[in-house]
Amino acid sequence: MRSASTEWIVSRAAVHRLALLAIAFLLATIPALTSAQGASPAATGEPTALEAMLARVPADLPGLDERSGTVIAFADIAAQLDAVGVEPPASRDDPGYAEWAAATGSLNLPRSASTTGTYEREDYGFDLSDVHQTFYVERPPFSLTLLQGEFDLDAVRGALETAGFTAVDVGGHELLSLRDANAVEFDGPVGFRMAGMNFAVILDDGTLAFSSSGEPLAAVMDVADGVAPSMLDFAGISELVAQAPPDLASAMLVIGLDLGGNLPPSLIGSTAVPDMSAMATEAASRGELPPVGLALLGNTVGGPLEVDDAPVELPPGTPDARAVAVLLMLTPELAEAAVPVIEERLETEESVESGEPFAVTFPERSVTAVPGTPVVTVDLALAPGVRPHVLTRMFFDRDLGFLAWW
């Protein structure tokens, strides 16, 4: 992250209040902007794959008490495979498995899948070759995973029954349960040993959903029944994802506080509730990045691909994957003010981890404030050898200096 000459000693309580205040401010101010625009893909045509998944995820997630540090991630396996002309393998012994693994290696797949590389068909009744889109929310012990695809649902039910799942009632909904909420047991199939797949449900539309406890799945079913709001019903989130590129392959949603950086001096050791509007005005006036409320970090579909360090020949016209960030600011004016700050940092600063200038990692850059909205889009071409999920890696390394605002 951007270095500073002073090592700040931070009040954790002040940081948490800042996160909550930022979200509250956004939820209070963005709805009017969103309804005034009314131009999301979901409103004007078919929803994107990301929007369709968000529409299944509850806005309120029981058991998730702390949003900061939560991983919220989406992957569109089908779109990525289609873009690079790779077919799903029949098994790990399929000659095309290596290309499939290379094509999906930069996607933010659920931990329950990435732990072993795939779901085992004999254990679950399906594997990743059946999955089109994934979405998961995780902050241990909390875990929620949704999978969309083409499944043999009878095979899935049979496999879950064989694994020991039994029917339970949670919140008036019938779910399948393997063990108690958040319990871990190191017996049985690898993917079932951790808590993330303790509870399961198959939605009417064929979506598979797993969770560490029953209440989140009951909330998923409330959303499916139309009696509870989804994440997409949050105006701030719908505004953000409406500006995501249509060829998105993978993405994480993070609250702006988790982008990291240095706290404003007024918050160092402070227990007072900060004034977000004043902070935003001060940041803009001194040429710093105004506060970011929410962010989408991801990449688009495409190549190049390598297997054993050798390039894979892709169909003519295959697009090059790009790194993308979409930022939700507090106002359209602050979105405009953020553009030159991000542009300058990308041009002049460097990675703390590698020492590589951002301008070398991202040789072509486009930073745009979407007119009339509080949204900034950042589109980045990748230098040879840079993996498409570079922004995800930089996020976990706390190395996104060009997006740090506090």
Image (cartoon, rainbow, N blue to C red):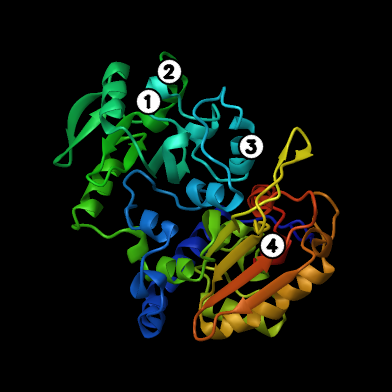
Q: Residues within 10 Å of mark 2 (few under 14, many from 20)?
A: few
Image check: 280 left or right of 163? right
Q: Amino acid at mark 3?
A: Glu
Identity of the residue drawn at 50% across and 86% down: 372
Foreground residue among 219 and 97 = 97
Does the rendering let one see residue 250? yes
Q: Amino acid at mark 2?
A: Pro
Which residue was labeled with disc 4?
262
Which quarter of the rendering shows the N terminus? bottom right
Residue 269 numbered mark, or none: none
User: Which x, y percent locates residue 351?
Assistant: 80, 56
Residue 189 numbered mark, or none: 2
User: Which x, y percent locates residue 69?
Assistant: 53, 49
Which mark is first along the chain, 3 or 2?
3
Question: Which is in the foreground here, disc 4 or disc 2?
Answer: 2
Quarter location, residue 343: bottom right
Residue at the outermost front position:
316
Image check: 13 left or right of 43? right
Which residue was labeled with disc 3?
99
Structural distance between the alpha carbons of marks 4 and 2: 44 Å
**Do the residues under discs 2 and 3 have CB atoms within 8 angstroms?**
no
Identity of the residue drawn at 63% across and 78% down: 368
**Do the residues under discs 3 and 4 have CB atoms within 8 angstroms?**
no
Which residue was labeled with disc 1?
124
Image check: 48 left or right of 222? right
Asked if 200 appears above or below 383 in the picture, the reply is above
Which mark is first along the chain, 2 or 1?
1
